[in-house]
Amino acid sequence: MKVKKFIAPTMPEAMNQVKKELGESAIILDSREIKTSRFFGLFGKRNIEVLAAVDPQPTRNRNAVRSKKETANHATKRSNHVKSVQKTKTSEEKVSARLSLSNEYPHPVESTLQRLRQNGIDEDTRANVLQTLLSTYYKKDEEMTESELLDVTKEFFKKEMSPYIQGTAKQSKHLYILGPTGVGKTTTIAKMAANDKMKYSKDIAFITLDTYRIAAIEQLKTYAKILDIPIEVAYNAEDLEAAKDKFEDKDLIYIDTAGRNYMKNEYIHQLKDMAKFKEQDQLICVLSLTSKEDDMNMIYHQFSELPVDTVIFTKADETSTYGQIFNLWKKHRFDILALTNGQDVPNDLLDVDEEVLARIMVGEKLW
Ligand SMILES: Nc1nc2c(ncn2[C@@H]2O[C@H](COP(=O)(O)OP(=O)(O)O)[C@@H](O)[C@H]2O)c(=O)[nH]1
Ligand SMILES: [Mg+2]
């Protein structure tokens, strides 16, 4: 990475110099207004100092170009606020000193990126994080440690995701739990219902549409018995309406559905015909973190025919990478209701907030 300082009377002139010398892919690391003293501090002239960098490696250049504009805007804004400072010879030298000899990014930046890569965070997001890390790193006068940069990275994820995290709040009385076979739909219903009932004193009922397998009915009936929750089995749309009417005075009704190969559209249509979803229903898609990211993406996409807007991720204990959560979320912007991390009912259910998700995204082990 080549880092260079430019001084010009105005920001546009400085940017022209940057472009001419470092090319279109240069990134602005910092900018400020400086006062150059000519003669015993007299006749001082105001100038703009811009610290810019370019990476000779093509992939990095691509990343830099993507957010160059944002950084430049940010830098311009900042230059309006920064106090005039005496010109010193230090900044360029400091920056060079901080760069590792191998022409790579500074070591703590590299290792933070490496963590994200190992956790499965996609390249596009890593490029955005890199931008944030570099500008924070070079604006500080002292060296930043990896742990400080991790905090910056967590803030990045927190800020992105916080408006989409639901925590325990359910938006509706009728909660349809949908998803592929064996992802943990029924188990997760039992966990959530137990929590809602015991922790939050909610009055709960179960309805199951999963009449495809006898064992599936028995499974939910067993949980209903243990938790002392009433249950109805619905074989068709009329049964479902009757069951919903019966439980009209309940606080929350969990509606279990059959796991199907939802890559096939016909199953989506079957579900639509049977459930006749209403606007006020909450449709929750359950996805297992042990599935391939492309498959999860495809399934969620298939569900876009239905008013699905919430996801629960299961089997977090059976994987070692979690970046796929963010990668998928970025594509679909769903609400995240919970994460499950084991077979134990009701304990292995993790309420998520932005703090928890940010920690998971940087690869912290929470269980
Ligand atoms: N390791 C692990 N297993 C889970 C989790 N959630 C569910 N399971 C297991 O996954 C299997 C299928 O669960 P089930 O609720 O029947 O899935 P469904 O077909 O989607 O209703 C069962 O053996 C569950 O105990 C989880 O978070 N972690
Ligand atoms: Mg089930």
Image (spheres, grey):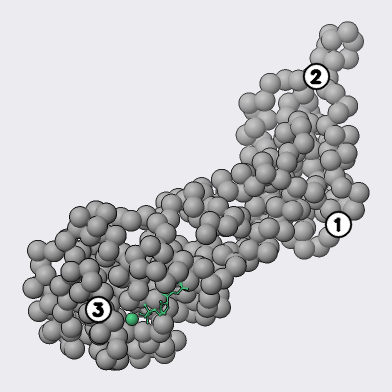
Is 78 drawn above or below residue 331 in the view shown?
above
Residue visible at 87% across and 47% down in the picture: 100
Q: Position of residue 99 (x, y in %)?
A: 85, 45
Whether label 2 touches label 3, CB < 8 Å: no
Ligand 2 falls in quadrant: bottom left
**Quarter residue 43 falls in:** top right
Q: Position of residue 312 (x, y in %)?
A: 40, 67
Would you say the beta carbon of the disc 2 residue lies within 8 angstroms of ligand 1? no
Whether residue 253 is visible, yes or no, is no
**Quarter residue 203 falls in:** bottom left
Q: Considering the numbered disc 3 on the image, is that residue within a helix, a strand or a loop? A: helix
N-terminal-most mark, 3 or 1: 1
Is 124 drawn above or below residue 129 in the view shown?
below
N-terminal-most mark, 2 or 1: 1
The residue carrying mark 1 is 56
Going by the image, does 38 lie left or right of 142? right
Residue visible at 29% across and 85% down in the picture: 216
User: Identity of the amino acid at label 2?
Assistant: Gln
Is 136 drawn above or below residue 244 in the view shown?
above
Any mark on residue 310, and which?
none
Is 167 drawn above or below residue 133 in the view shown?
below
The residue carrying mark 2 is 86
Q: Nearer the viewer, mark 3 or mark 1?
A: 3
The residue carrying mark 3 is 222
Whether residue 353 is visible, yes or no, is yes
Residue visible at 61% across and 58% down in the picture: 363
**Mark 1 packing: few (<14 Cα in 10 Å), some, or many (20+)?**
some
Residue visible at 90% across and 53% down in the picture: 102
